[in-house]
Image: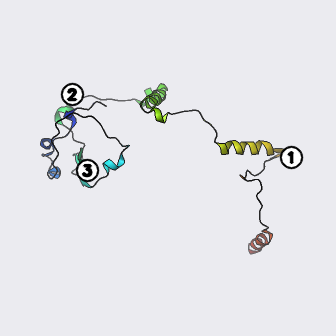
Amino acid sequence: MPVAKTHIPTNEEIVKWPHLNNIVLPDINGTIGLMIGNNVPDAYTPYDIATGSVGSPHATRSRLGWIVWNLIRKDSITETNAVVNRAQLTAIHENNKLDSLVRKSINLDFPELLIDDKKENSIEDNYFLKQVNESIEFEDGHYQVALPFRNKEVKFPNNVSQGLNRLKGL
């Protein structure tokens, strides 16, 4: 993600918003070396929030300090230097390569989390399928399959009297 120091909000930019007057941003004299994303949720835990009218910037105080959101600079919205990234849904549906490209990108960026589309059964799935295959029978025009218990030695208690009592209650 291309980020430059000019993207960092300054005190001079937020002073025109009355709801942000109590916020003091540090002057950062350096380059951006690391961007912290949403994979570090504790870094963004809000301690305080400053909001204004609809469409105005807002700020959140977190462990990292104040973070100013939605700051729109007048010079960044002129027609001569506006940059817009747009994906048209019809183009995405027509080109099914998008999913493949995203998966390849994720696999390259995060090799420890390889996205594998290969579907495999778990050990329990294989055990279930084995039980079904071994117990299936066709009898009197119907298929019968044993109940797929993990332990084949299941013993049910004799509950005839409880069933009769319920039947009488109905």
Residue with the mark numbered 3: 60
Q: Callout 2: helix, strand or loop?
A: loop
Q: Residues within 10 Å of mark 3 (few under 14, many from 20)?
A: many
Q: Position of residue 129 (x, y in %)?
A: 72, 42
- The span from disc 3 to disc 2 (Cα, nearest Å) is 30 Å
Residue with the mark numbered 2: 79
Residue with the mark numbered 1: 139
Give the mark nearest the N terminus, 1 or 2: 2
Give the mark nearest the N terminus, 3 or 2: 3
Looking at the rendering, in which quadrant would you find the C terminus?
bottom right
Q: Nearer the viewer, mark 3 or mark 2?
A: 3
Q: Callout 1: helix, strand or loop?
A: strand
Instruction: Tell me which amino acid carries mark 2.
Output: Glu
- The span from disc 1 to disc 2 (Cα, nearest Å) is 77 Å
Q: Are marks 3 and 2 in contact (CB under 8 Å)?
A: no
- The span from disc 3 to disc 1 (Cα, nearest Å) is 69 Å
In this rendering, would 97 be left or right of 139?
left
Looking at the rendering, in which quadrant would you find the N terminus?
top left
Q: Position of residue 119 (x, y in %)?
A: 60, 35
User: Dividing the picture into quarters, in which one does residue 11 lie?
Assistant: top left
Q: Nearer the viewer, mark 1 or mark 2?
A: 1
Q: Residues within 10 Å of mark 1 (few under 14, many from 20)?
A: few
Give the mark nearest the N terminus, 3 or 1: 3
